[in-house]
Amino acid sequence: MKTMLQNREILLAVLILVMILLVGVITPDFLLPSNLLAVYNDTSILIILALGQMLVILTRCIDLSVAANLALTGMVVAMLNSAYPALPVPLLMGVGALLGLLLGVVNGALVWKLGIPAIVVTLGTMSIYRGLVFLLSDGAWVNAHEMSASFVSIPRSTVLGLPVLAWVSVLVIVIMVHFTRQRRLGREIYAAGNNPTAAFYTGIQVGRLQFVAFSISGLLAGLCGYLWVSRYAVAYVDVAAGFELQVIAACVIGGVSIMGGIGTVQGCVLGALFLGVINNALPVLGVSPFWQMAISGAVIVIAVIANSRAERKVGRIILKKAALHAG
Amino acid sequence: MEKIMHKPMATSGLPAIGLSRRLLSWEFFLLLMTAVVFGLNSLASPYFLDPWNLSDATFNFVEKAVVALPLAMLIICREIDLSVASIIALASAAMGFTAQAGAGTELIVLAGLVTGLLCGLVNGLLVTRFEIPSIVVTIGTMSLFRGITYILLGDTVLKNYPESFAYLGQGYVYWVFSFEFVLFGVLALLFYGLLHRTNFGRRTYAIGNNPTAAFYSGINVARHRLILFVLVGLISGLASVLLTSRLGSTRPTIALGWELSIITMVVLGGVSIMGGAGTILGVVIAVFLMGLVTFGLGLLNVPGIVMSIIIGAMLIGVIATPVLLIKFKGRKSAP
């Protein structure tokens, strides 16, 4: 039992279950399978983005531009759809993912080739991508009636009991589990983040892996661009504004270390679900929406305090006190 | 670590550099850019060079610039604070309620400053006591402080500020020099002294360059960081006083997104985000550069969101330039 409680993922899963049950005690309808499914579906985009962000954070970088990337690709896809309703939706999804990949490649190249710190690069591209949405749309909205029926309905249509949106996130989770555990590239990303110097001497190009991580994060953000815009059936400049912080928060709650090298797909998914359950439970409990931001802020702070205890590396530096103070 | 965390610029602020080095310094480059933008602005609009017009221009960036000064020191010390804009909001709410209770200007200002200080203390304690990376802590407190502001204010607006309170953000000390601007000048001098002329400043660089070595040299690293976080909080509270006084009202969305433009000012000023390098002079010039660019674009009727493209491109471009120059030079000299 003790080891089980020490395992972060299990602890987090238990916490989520307790939360769901507590909400269920007050409003039993929350426990209906259809509602729980809706909660998962609602969290799907956060899960996908958090998994991309996790790869970036594993390499000791951070991608603040994901939400702006999502807004830009979402707007491009929505405008394409309203201008050429005949274009098949899978093609548009591909366009979105490719454009997202391109935006991620820009981030990755600046970090890899020019050695500019990731936080500076993505702070800049975040403003640029968001501004481009305005330039492209001239500040106008693309509304539901301008989108084709299939564009809006595909993520909602149910296949084998699950909406396509949820299936996409399941697919991304499965691919990411395989990628981070079985593929050489995935393992190298952990090595690069855990100890860049050691990775360098083993022949791993740290910068190249940061580039790869940014590219994947961009690709997933581009995919989410379509999913977001079609799910909410609207595209405008401020789509997902500030969502990058939720994405990073999901990673941190899930135990991804901001210092790189530590983090698992299942932890990250649970972190996203944790936030998703809170976001969905608060309105059900009748909590004023004005409380939501403070609650998620408090959750992040508490989660990182819990993380800091788990992550503390013992015995690496002989003088423990020194490690404690110098951090 | 050093391999990937490569510093694009190295302006350490040491006084002993020759003229040729100084001409190549980051500050000189920024000054040149500022002069160019200034010249372009005066060409673009005949109204630009009017003293009152220039004075009006300062209002748009002085409140952010005030926060950039302590934040520069914090970033030099290898930490970061993303919650500054949320601190401004919470401090503004505190002032709004103090004013609503019928308090005078002094008490309102005190409420703002104390709130800022306490927020900084929360950040600092979380970072130093629990050893959590400051970027994560302040992402959390950024939501927390702004969230508390939302809880306190909901969708209401507080605007029962006494008349004398308005002077702080709207008054003029002498001719075109506003109180805000003069205060920024005084603070810039104070922070220059603190960073470049005191032991405290030298310790800030030492910790930023190598926290472990600094610890073994007898510097109380945790306490030093805590002081800097409190200082950033306090000055954010001060910025909140200025902003609230200028706007004459408090909304929960006050100063939304400011943390990014403030950090952009600091980084543009040549402060290394990896710590250990940067000067107050650079930050001050960067503040004016950004202020002039924004104002000039405003004169040309460029919408705010397009300005953010230009600011973002400027941030990356300005930092990439020296790296590209070094790469280009390195390739040429290679056999």
Image: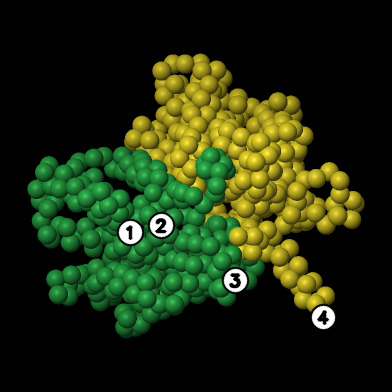
Chain colours: A green, B yellow
Which of the marked residues, 1 or 3, is nearer the chain's N terminus? 3
In space, the residues marked 1 and 4 are separated at their CA atoms by 50 Å
Foreground pick, A325 / B223: A325
Residue B92 showing in the rendered view: no
* Amino acid found under the numbered disc labelled 4: Pro
Residue A5 image position (x, y, % from top left): 26, 49
Q: Quadrant of the N terminus of chain B?
A: bottom right
Q: Element under label 1?
A: helix
User: Residue at the spot x=34%, y=64% of the render?
Assistant: A265
Q: Which residue shows up at 41% across the image and 57% down it? A: A256
Q: Residues within 10 Å of mark 1 (few under 14, many from 20)?
A: many
Q: Nearer the viewer, residue A166 or A249?
A: A249
Residue receiving disc 2: A256
Q: Which mark is residue B187?
A: none
Foreground disc of the pair 1, 3:
3
Residue at 20% across, 41% down = A286
Task: Calculate the distance from the C-alpha at mark 3 to the C-alpha at mark 2.
Answer: 25 Å
Q: Earlier in the sequence, mark 3 or mark 2?
A: 3
Question: Going by the image, does B190 lie left or right of A170?
Answer: right
Q: Which residue is the extreme one toward the right?
A: B19
Say if mark 4 contacts mark 2, CB within 8 Å. no
Q: Splitting the image into 4 quarters, where does residue B197 fall?
A: top right
Q: Are marks 3 and 2 on the same chain?
A: yes
Q: Chain of mark 1?
A: A
Q: Which residue is mark 1?
A: A267
Name the image quarter holding the C terminus of chain B.
bottom right
Which chain is indicated by disc 2? A
Residue carrying label 3: A201
Q: Is residue B43 above or below residue B241?
A: below
